[in-house]
């Protein structure tokens, strides 16, 4: 067995916190989760609420979802519920479905076994990262496998007690994010834990403890080994939590942002326009989420990559002698392609991103019917919002262009017509009337 295996983790003595010693009430728990717990208990299995929901309830926050850990295997869980399906490859678990609510039920996980014979169940790659992980275990082993002390508490619905295996209750009181076990090993096993640490620090207004903190600076580079598809999901959780700004500032501080957005990171010097732009986009995203408005990853990703595209496009014009239009098209493809090596942005979003980018140039060509056609385009709203933000940051002509579009949307049709006529008048004879085709000479 390898020395960096989590079986080496010695947990402090388990503490049982009785119902009178904490603030969780059964009424605060999803009725569906309680149903699942009771059913599993009635069938003779151990079953607990675990992880984020216990932590959030202790902090008087609304849990996003309710997860359950049990000693029943996925098949045994499935046998208990009609509305249950088994999912997952990296770790098989059961989903019990109640309309729109899904209760995730996972069998206790055991230590990873580094034995040749069992390598089909648990496997690490060259950097110590777990790539497969399907070993069942005991409750205590399950606790040792969890990432942070605040995430390793188990609530028992039968008597309202909490089993605290890693000092989670103390961490909650001290408002500290602490890894369970040795930080280097735990980050190597799963580098996503580094961005989870940052996410929880921002979300729960807590501080990452010194050892867990130092190790992030040192091992940030390991994020480069995470499959781009997994990072797409994780980045959504980071930036679409409603505390995106704090999270992003922490990501920058820890050197994690550069690993996620290698083309954007180097441009974000304090007080640079790029920094102001991204700060503003993330602030607006937070405000929209906290007001219950719709947000799309396409807009945020479009913003992240906008200045890298502009920079690359200008370079292409100078170095390759391409026309500005060709250079811009090529820059969109190059920059997007490089970003996709790190984060797999689904096609449905990258198509919208391209539309938003292309619109930025089209929006200045407003003559004739074009202005009306653009206004009717399904992507106009996003493109206009994007332009407005750029205008606010950069000022000058861009600001005026954005103002023009603001007015154009608000005024009546006669005024619209006049606005376009004014543009023609300002721009001189070239655009003032449609050039007539030269008449063909009769043969
Ligand atoms: P959130 O409120 O964002 O859902 P959460 O703690 O519930 O936070 P989940 O991703 O839902 O986060 O994971 C549920 C639980 O599974 C965690 O609380 C933790 O115990 C465990 N866990 C999740 N990801 C990891 C990981 N990468 N390494 C170890 N344990 C993990
Ligand atoms: Mg959760």
Image: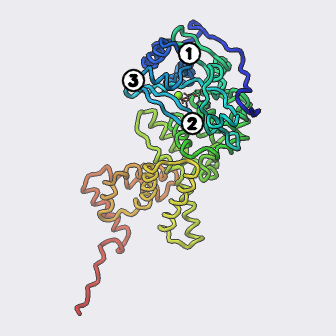
Residue 371 at x, y percent in the picture: 33, 59
- In the displayed orientation, state which residue is furthest to the top: 20
Whether residue 388 appears in this view of the structure is no
Q: Nearer the viewer, residue 68 or 182?
A: 68
- Viewer-side label of 3, 1: 3
Q: CA distance from mark 2 to mark 1?
A: 25 Å
Q: Secondary structure at mark 1?
A: strand
Label located before the other in sequence (3 or 1): 3
Q: Secondary structure at mark 2?
A: loop
378 or 182, which is in the foreground?
182
Mark 3 Cβ and ligand 2 under 8 Å apart: no
Crowding at label 2, few (<14), some or many (≥20) Cα neighbours within 10 Å?
Answer: few
In front of the other: 299 or 148: 148
| Residue that sits furthest to the left in the current view | 442
Task: Specify the quadrant that holds the N terminus.
Answer: top right
Instruction: Compare residues 230 and 355 and report the one nearer the observer.
Output: 230
Q: Are marks 3 and 2 in contact (CB under 8 Å)?
A: no
Residue under circle 2?
90
Q: CA distance from mark 3 to mark 2?
A: 24 Å
Residue that label 1 marks:
155
Q: Residue 233: where, in percent of width, then height?
A: 52, 40
Height in image: 191 above or below 419?
Answer: above
Density class for disc 3 (Cα within 10 Å; few <14, some 14-19, many ≥20) is few
- Asked whether the residues under the numbered discs 3 and 1 touch, taking CB atoms below 8 Å apart as contact, a structural biologist would say no
Left or right of 264 in this view: 412: left
Which residue sits at x=72%, y=25%? 9
Of the residues under marks 3 and 2, which one precedes in the sequence?
3
Residue labelled with disc 3: 82
Position of residue 100 measured from the top left corner of the image (x, y, whole percent): 39, 28
Q: Quadrant of the C terminus?
A: bottom left
């Amino acid at each position: 067995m390898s020395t960096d295996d989590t079986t080496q983790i010695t947990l402090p003595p388990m503490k049982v916190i009785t119902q009178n010693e904490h603030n969780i009430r059964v009424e605060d728990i999803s009725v569906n989760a309680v149903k699942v717990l009771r059913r599993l208990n009635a069938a003779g299995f151990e079953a607990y609420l675990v992880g984020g929901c216990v932590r959030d309830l202790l902090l008087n926050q609304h849990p996003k979802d309710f997860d359950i850990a049990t000693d029943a295997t996925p098949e045994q869980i499935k046998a208990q519920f009609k509305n249950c399906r088994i999912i997952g490859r990296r770790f098989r678990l059961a989903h019990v479905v109640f309309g729109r609510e899904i209760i995730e039920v996972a069998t206790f996980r055991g230590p990873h076994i580094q034995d040749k014979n069992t390598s089909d169940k648990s496997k690490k790659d060259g950097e110590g990262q777990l790539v497969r992980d399907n070993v069942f275990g005991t409750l205590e082993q399950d606790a040792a496998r969890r990432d942070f002390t605040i995430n390793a508490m188990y609530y028992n619905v039968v008597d309202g007690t909490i089993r605290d295996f890693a000092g989670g209750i103390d961490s909650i009181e001290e408002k500290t994010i602490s890894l369970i076990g040795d930080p280097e090993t735990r980050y190597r096993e799963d580098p996503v834990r580094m961005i989870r640490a940052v996410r929880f620090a921002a979300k729960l207004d807590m501080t990452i403890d010194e050892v867990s903190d130092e190790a992030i600076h040192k091992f940030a580079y390991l994020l480069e080994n995470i499959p781009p598809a997994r990072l797409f999901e994780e980045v959504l959780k980071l930036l679409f939590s409603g505390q995106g700004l704090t999270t992003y500032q922490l990501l920058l501080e820890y050197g994690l942002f550069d690993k996620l957005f290698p083309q954007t990171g180097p441009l974000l010097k304090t007080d640079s326009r790029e920094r102001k732009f991204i700060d503003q986009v993330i602030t607006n995203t937070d405000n929209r989420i906290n007001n219950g408005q719709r947000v799309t990853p396409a807009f945020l990703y479009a913003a992240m990559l906008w200045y890298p595209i502009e920079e690359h496009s200008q370079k292409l014009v100078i170095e390759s002698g391409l026309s500005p239009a060709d250079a811009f098209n090529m820059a969109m493809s190059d920059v997007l392609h490089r970003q996709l090596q790190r984060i797999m942005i689904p096609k449905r979003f990258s198509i919208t991103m391209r539309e938003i980018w292309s619109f930025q140039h089209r929006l200045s060509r407003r003559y004739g019917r074009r202005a009306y056609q653009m206004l009717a385009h399904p992507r106009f709203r996003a493109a206009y919002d994007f332009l407005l933000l750029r205008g606010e940051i950069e000022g000058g002509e861009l600001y005026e262009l954005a103002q023009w579009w603001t007015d154009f949307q608000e005024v009546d049709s006669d005024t619209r017509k006049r606005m376009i006529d004014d543009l023609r008048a300002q721009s001189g004879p070239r655009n003032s009337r449609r050039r007539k085709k030269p008449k063909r000479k009769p043969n």
